[in-house]
Image (cartoon, helix red, strand yellow):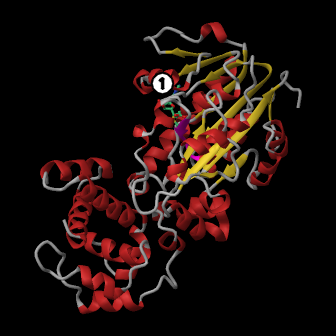
Amino acid sequence: MTPAAHVSAAIEILDDLAQRRRPAAEALKDWGASHRFAGSKDRAAIASLVFDALRKAASAAWIMGADTPRARMLGALREARGMDAAAIAALCTGERHAPPPLTDDERVRLETATLDGAPDHVRGDYPEWLAERFAAAFGDRAAEEGAALAARAPVDLRVNILKGSREQALAKLSHLNPQSTPLSPIGLRIDAGQGRGPALSAETAYVKGFVEPQDEASQLASLLCAAAPGEQVLDLCAGGGGKALALAGQMHNKGQLYAYDADGRRLMPIHERLERAGARNIQVRQPKGQADVLADIEGRCDLVLIDAPCTGTGTWRRHPDAKWRLAPGALELRLKEQAALLEQAVRFVKIGGRLAYVTCSLLRDENEEQVAAFLAGHSEFAAMSGDEAAVKAGLPELARFASPHGAGLRFSPATSGTDGFYVCVMRRGCRGWV
Ligand SMILES: C[S@@+](CC[C@H](N)C(=O)[O-])C[C@H]1O[C@@H](n2cnc3c(N)ncnc32)[C@H](O)[C@@H]1O
């Protein structure tokens, strides 16, 4: 397929997405299944175009003065890829499988339109219904934060310290030109360019468990939990085990980590990942009907981690379609689940133990406000300051990410160059100790 045919195919898929609210990956898969002639390189190029158009959907539509799949794609070629009107016109020849030629209006817009005067949610490419919440979280930096969330993310890997050091992992992956991550002492970063990044599953370092894909902020969230060897730790929302594996590394396989998730199917990948990582101190606790499968660890945990279900607004760099599919009802639901999980976690934290609340959201309602509401009803808990949590984790430089809106630390693409994450570590004392 030619580059112009890739653009036509991307517009077709964007049209499908506009008509049926569904994940982009699903639409791309269906397109691939019905266009067998397209090879894997073609499919990757088309996916990359679709994701760029989704990243820049609002600003591209503004530039083009129309919110159609074609306008989004043409605008994104300029906004996301820096192509000028002549280069875009050269793709749109109308010949064979190329998109129809540019109209006069399209050409003029591509040559001259700017985002001057556009509202923050357009300049930052986020849904209008979240504009107030972004303003509450970022003030006059809302558009800048949104734009950083609309950029491409690098591929971040966590070095599994149970298997080797970061230096060893850098050497094993040297053909991919990895760099050390600036904030996480156990992270590697690979620039994915415009493609999907390296096929990790074929890398020996991955197969042998030396590295796991994990965004740098997710690594930092795990490190801020400061799990120590010998501790009793509950990962209450373990899912596929990303954080559990990181915590097991910090614990040097000593002590016990219980990995639980209300949805047993989500725990499934964890078994193979544990094996690969050589993590031997993790007990997976599957939910079993009405049975209380965590009853034996009540009041015994040094650390309980709630890696809470959330809107995922911090991960839009990696899932640009998710921002347009997110609906207000989903936020309401997540807020209820988060409050319930904080209550649920209390019974497992021993006196003197820690409760870590983590989301990959940037919205205050899901973060500082959720923690404030919890603390208001639980005088036996107190939040560690950003300084204290950073020092306890052995990463004092992270104190600068202390939230300006209340307890906890927040990371974001614009401030830390990572996915958006929120982390608050609380200590449990006796009732009324603070
Ligand atoms: C953000 S994901 C966890 C990701 C995982 N910790 C990781 O690092 O790969 C949130 C998880 O919370 C789980 N969850 C939602 N409500 C829950 C509840 N009441 N109790 C336990 N798990 C819950 C979901 O099934 C989902 O797997």
**Residue 384 in sight here:** yes
Residue under the image location 55 percent in, 49 percent down: 174
Q: In which quarter of the image is residue 70?
A: bottom left
- Viewer-nearest residue: 80 or 194: 194
Q: In which quarter of the image is residue 388?
A: top right
Quadrant position of residue 320: bottom left
Q: What stretch is highlighted in magenta?
A: 211-215
Q: Which of 170 and 390 is in front in this view?
A: 170
Q: Is residue 274 magenta?
A: no
Dominant SS of magenta comes to strand
| Residue 280 rendering spot, x and y as whole percentages | 59, 16
The answer, for residue 366, to whether it is visible in the render is no
Q: Is residue 336 left or right of residue 28?
A: right
Q: Where is residue 21 in the image (x, y as percent from the top left)?
A: 29, 52
Task: Work out which quarter of the rendered image holds the C terminus and state it.
Answer: top right
Q: Mark 1 sits on what residue?
A: 270
Q: In this rendering, is residue 241 above or below 300?
A: below
Q: How crowded is mark 1: few (under 14 residues within 10 Å), some or many (20 or more)?
A: many
At 32% across and 88% down in the image, what residue appears? 86
Circle 1 sits in a helix, a strand or a loop, which is it?
helix
Where in the figure is residue 284, as x and y percent of width and height?
A: 52, 16
Q: Name the residue rendered at 52%, 30% in the picture.
A: 209
